[in-house]
C-alpha cells in the first residue's frame, strides 16, 4: 500500500491579537492588563490566571519545565482585514488564499521583538531554546526560575476526583517594554491532555452484578437487533450483561458501510470528482495505529484494487518515540497504540466519504499534559499547508485549558483559514457537560478546539429506529433522525429509579450525548447568524465564565455548527485489531462479544461525525476545483439562503429524544445539533 513516512519537529505557535476581532467581536482587552501594583515597570498579562474552585494543596516544584511565550502578530489589524476580505464574496480577494509561507512572511513578529523577549527570559536565568515558529519564544528552567521571571505563583491543586495538577495561581507579569508583544504563556498548567471521542457499546460496561431483565429489547433477523430500550441500557451498562447487538450492513452487523452512509446523506453521483479526487485530506492524531487494519477495511468495502493513500507524518517523535517537552509528561498509557480505535475510525470514516482523495495525511504527535505537543502538531499542519480538509477528533473541555492556550491555538487556525484549509472538530460526547470525562466536573461546558471561531464544530445525531440492515442504498429516514442522547438518559437529573438509580451525569458519561452549548472564551463570530442563533439559551459575555475574551454583553460563540450520525447504537462499521506487538492498544482489549466477526465492531461518537464532514469538505473542494476554506461562512450563508435545500433540520418534533442532556432540539438552529445534518449532493455540487 502507498504509505510514506515523514517526521517533523516544530515549536508551538501562539498569537491572537486583534486579528480575530473581525469574526468574534471586539476583545475584552489586549494582551496587557493594568499595571501591577508591586512595580510600575511590571504589567499583568490579561486573562493569564484561570479562576477555579479547586483546592490549593501546596506549591509546585520541578527541576526543569518548558514554557512558551506567545507573541502578537506584527500587523494584527492587517490580518483581521485579510481574513475578512478572503471570506467576503463581494471582495476582490475572495478565496484568494495565502500561499504556503506567506502567512509568516506577512504577520510574523519582528526579529527585534523576539530578541527583546528572549533577552528578558535569559536575564531571568531561563535557557532560550530554538523554535521553528516565528510567533513563539521557547525557554526552559526550574519552576522557581519560571515563577520568578513571570512574578507568578505556581501551585498544586486537587480536582473533584482527587487528581492533582499544577497551574499558576496568580497573574503572569512581564516588564512593560515586552508585555505589549505577548498574549500569554503556555506551559504553566498540566491539565491540557486531549482525549479521543469514540464511543462503542463496550466503552464503560460494568461488571455484572445481577441477572439481566428479560425485557431488554427485541431482535430482528440474523445478527440485527432493535434500537436498545432503557432496560437494555440498564442491563448492559449497570449490570454488565453481555447482550447481543447488531446494526447495518457491515460484517457481522458491525455498523453502516460506506455505501450506506453516503446513501443516507444523499451523496452525489458525480464520479471521482464527487469523492475527493485530487485533494489532500488529513486527520489530527495522538496515537499509533496499524496500517494493515486500514488495508483490511478498504479491501472489504472497495476491493483488492484499492490502496488507501496514507501518508504518515510524525511530530515531536510521535506517540511511539515521544520527544516530550522538558518537564512535561507523555505517559506511556496515553501514547503507544492507546488511541488506535480513534485513529482507525477517523481514517476509515474519511475514506468512506472521500475514497478518491490523492493523499490522506495522518499527522501524529505524542499526547502530553501541557498541550504543547498538540500545538506543535496543528502548527505542522498549517505550516506544510498540504491538506485542504482536516478532521480532529481529539479535544479537551474549555475549562481545562486556559486563555493563553486557546489564544495560542487560535492563530494556527487563523493561518489555516487564511490558506483556505478547512478544519472540522468533534463537539464532544457527554452532552452539555463536556468536562465529565476529563476532570469529572459537572459544569456546563463545551469542547476545545471545536469551540474556536475558525473551527467547524460537529455535533452528534442518531438514526434511532431506522436500521438499513443489508440494504446498500437506504434513503434518508425523514422524521426519525434525532439528537444523539440514547433513550434521553443523559441529563443533569439526580439518581432515581427511572435512571436505574444512577444520575443523569452517569449516563452522559456512559452512553454519551452530542456536545453543544456556549463558549467559555469566544464571542459570537460575525458569520454565525440566522434563525435560532440568538434565542432563549444564548449566553452573553460576563467577563468570567461566559466568552471571557469578548466584551461584556457580547453574545457567545455557539456550538455545534452542524451535526451527523454519532450514535454508537446506529454505528459505523470499524475494523481495528491489536496484539502484544501494539502496546496499550484499545482494540486489543475489546471483548469478543461485541465482534460478531473478529476485528469488526460498531463505533460512534462525534469522532465519527467530524471526519464525515471533513470528507464532505474535501469532496466539495474536488468538485468545485478549489479550496473552500473555513467551512463556517459557507454553512451559515447556505443556511440563511435555503436551509432546507442543504440541511436536515433536527427539530425534536414528535420525537422522544429531543435534547442533548440540557439544550433542546428545535426548529432552526439549536445548541444540540446546530444547523442540522448534511444533504451531501447539494453541499458538494451547489454554489
Image (tube, helix red, strand yellow):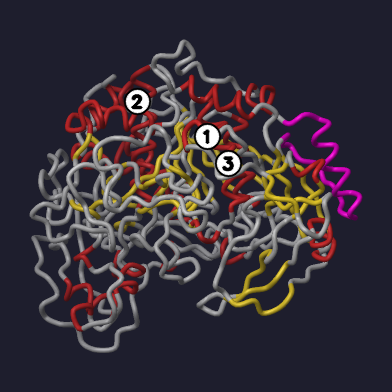
Per the image, label 3 sits on a secondary structure element best described as: helix
Expressed as whole percent of the image width and height from the top left, the position of residue 406 reads 57, 48
Closer mark to the observer between disc 2 and disc 1: 1
Q: Earlier in the sequence, mark 2 or mark 1?
A: 1
Closer mark to the observer between disc 3 and disc 1: 1
Residue drawn at x 30%, y 60% is 513
The mark found on residue 257 in the picture is none
Front-most of 608 and 104? 104
> Would you say residue 379 sits in the magenta stretch?
no
Expressed as whole percent of the image width and height from the top left, the position of residue 215 reads 10, 77
Q: Earlier in the sequence, mark 2 or mark 3?
A: 3
C-alpha gap between disc 2 and disc 1: 28 Å
Residue at mark 3: 378
The mark found on residue 21 in the picture is 1
- Report whether 227 appears left or right of 321: left
Quadrant location of residue 202?
bottom left
Residue drawn at x 14%, y 48% is 468
C-alpha gap between disc 3 and disc 1: 22 Å
- Report whether 559 appears left or right of 228: right
Residue drawn at x 77%, y 58% is 37
The mark found on residue 620 in the picture is 2
Q: Residues within 10 Å of mark 2 (few under 14, many from 20)?
A: many
Expressed as whole percent of the image width and height from the top left, the position of residue 196 reads 46, 57
Stretch of the chain drawn in magenta: 109-134
Amino acid at each position: 500500500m502507498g504509505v510514506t513516512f515523514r517526521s517533523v519537529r516544530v515549536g508551538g505557535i501562539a498569537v491572537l491579537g486583534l486579528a480575530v476581532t473581525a469574526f468574534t467581536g471586539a476583545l475584552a482587552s489586549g494582551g496587557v492588563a493594568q499595571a501591577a501594583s508591586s512595580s510600575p515597570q511590571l504589567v499583568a498579562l490579561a486573562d493569564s490566571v484561570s479562576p477555579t474552585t479547586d483546592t490549593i494543596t501546596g506549591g509546585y516544584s520541578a527541576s526543569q519545565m518548558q514554557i512558551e511565550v506567545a507573541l502578537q502578530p506584527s500587523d494584527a489589524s492587517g490580518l483581521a482585514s485579510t481574513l475578512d476580505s478572503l471570506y467576503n464574496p463581494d471582495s476582490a480577494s475572495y478565496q484568494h488564499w495565502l500561499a504556503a509561507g506567506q502567512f509568516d512572511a506577512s504577520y510574523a513578529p519582528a526579529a527585534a521583538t523576539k530578541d527583546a523577549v528572549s533577552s528578558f527570559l535569559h536575564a531571568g536565568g531561563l535557557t532560550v531554546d530554538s523554535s521553528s515558529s516565528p510567533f513563539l519564544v521557547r525557554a526552559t528552567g526550574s519552576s522557581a526560575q519560571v515563577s520568578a521571571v513571570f512574578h507568578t505563583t505556581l501551585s498544586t491543586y486537587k480536582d473533584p476526583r482527587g487528581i492533582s495538577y499544577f497551574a499558576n495561581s496568580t497573574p503572569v507579569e512581564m516588564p512593560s517594554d515586552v508585555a505589549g508583544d505577548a498574549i500569554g504563556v503556555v506551559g504553566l498548567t498540566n491539565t491540557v491532555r486531549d482525549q479521543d471521542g469514540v464511543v462503542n457499546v463496550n466503552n464503560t460496561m460494568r461488571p455484572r452484578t445481577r441477572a439481566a431483565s428479560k425485557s431488554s429489547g427485541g431482535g430482528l433477523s440474523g445478527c440485527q437487533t432493535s434500537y436498545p430500550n432503557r432496560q437494555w441500557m440498564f442491563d448492559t451498562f449497570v449490570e454488565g450483561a453481555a447482550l447481543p447487538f447488531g446494526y447495518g450492513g457491515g460484517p457481522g452487523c458491525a455498523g453502516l458501510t460506506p455505501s450506506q452512509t453516503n446513501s443516507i446523506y444523499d451523496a452525489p453521483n458525480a464520479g471521482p470528482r464527487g469523492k475527493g479526487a485530487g485533494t489532500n485530506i488529513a486527520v489530527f492524531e495522538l496515537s499509533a495505529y496499524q496500517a494493515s487494519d486500514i488495508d483490511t477495511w478498504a479491501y472489504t468495502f472497495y476491493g483488492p484494487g484499492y490502496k488507501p493513500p496514507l501518508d504518515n507524518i510524525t511530530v515531536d517523535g510521535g506517540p511511539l518515540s515521544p520527544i516530550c517537552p522538558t518537564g512535561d509528561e507523555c505517559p506511556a498509557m496515553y501514547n503507544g497504540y492507546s488511541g488506535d480505535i480513534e485513529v482507525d475510525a477517523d481514517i476509515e470514516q474519511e475514506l468512506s466519504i472521500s475514497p478518491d482523495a490523492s493523499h490522506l495525511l495522518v499527522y501524529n504527535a505524542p499526547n502530553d499534559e501541557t498541550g504543547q505537543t498538540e500545538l506543535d502538531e496543528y502548527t505542522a499542519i498549517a505550516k506544510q499547508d498540504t491538506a485542504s480538509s482536516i478532521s480532529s477528533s481529539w479535544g479537551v473541555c474549555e475549562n481545562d485549558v486556559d486563555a493563553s492556550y486557546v489564544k495560542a491555538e487560535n492563530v494556527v487556525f487563523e493561518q489555516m483559514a487564511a490558506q483556505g484549509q478547512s478544519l472540522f472538530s468533534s463537539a464532544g460526547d457527554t452532552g452539555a457537560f463536556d468536562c465529565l470525562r476529563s476532570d469529572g466536573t459537572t459544569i456546563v461546558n463545551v469542547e476545545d478546539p471545536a469551540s474556536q471561531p475558525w473551527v467547524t464544530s460537529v455535533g452528534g445525531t442518531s438514526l434511532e429506529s431506522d436500521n438499513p440492515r443489508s440494504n446498500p442504498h437506504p434513503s434518508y429516514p425523514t422524521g426519525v433522525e434525532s439528537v444523539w442522547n440514547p433513550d434521553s438518559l443523559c441529563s443533569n437529573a439526580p439518581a432515581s429509579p427511572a435512571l436505574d438509580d444512577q444520575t443523569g451525569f452517569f449516563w452522559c458519561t456512559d452512553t454519551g450525548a452530542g456536545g453543544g452549548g456556549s463558549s467559555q472564551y469566544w464571542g459570537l463570530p460575525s458569520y454565525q447568524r440566522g434563525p435560532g442563533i440568538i434565542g432563549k439559551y444564548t449566553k452573553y459575555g460576563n467577563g468570567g465564565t461566559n466568552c471571557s475574551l469578548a466584551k461584556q454583553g457580547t453574545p457567545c460563540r455557539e456550538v455545534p455548527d452542524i451535526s451527523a450520525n454519532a450514535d454508537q447504537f446506529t454505528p459505523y462499521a470499524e475494523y481495528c485489531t491489536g496484539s502484544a506487538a501494539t502496546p496499550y492498544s484499545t482494540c486489543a482489549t475489546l471483548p469478543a462479544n461485541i465482534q460478531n466477526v473478529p476485528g469488526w465492531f460498531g463505533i460512534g461518537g462525534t469522532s465519527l461525525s467530524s471526519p464525515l464532514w471533513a470528507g464532505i469538505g474535501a469532496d466539495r473542494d474536488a468538485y468545485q476545483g478549489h479550496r473552500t476554506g473555513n467551512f463556517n461562512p459557507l454553512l451559515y450563508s447556505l443556511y440563511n439562503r435555503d436551509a432546507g435545500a442543504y440541511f436536515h433540520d433536527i427539530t425534536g418534533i414528535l420525537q422522544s429524544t429531543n435534547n442533548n442532556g440540557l439544550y433542546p432540539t428545535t426548529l432552526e438552529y439549536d445548541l444540540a445539533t446546530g444547523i442540522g445534518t448534511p444533504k451531501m449532493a447539494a453541499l458538494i455540487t451547489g454554489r
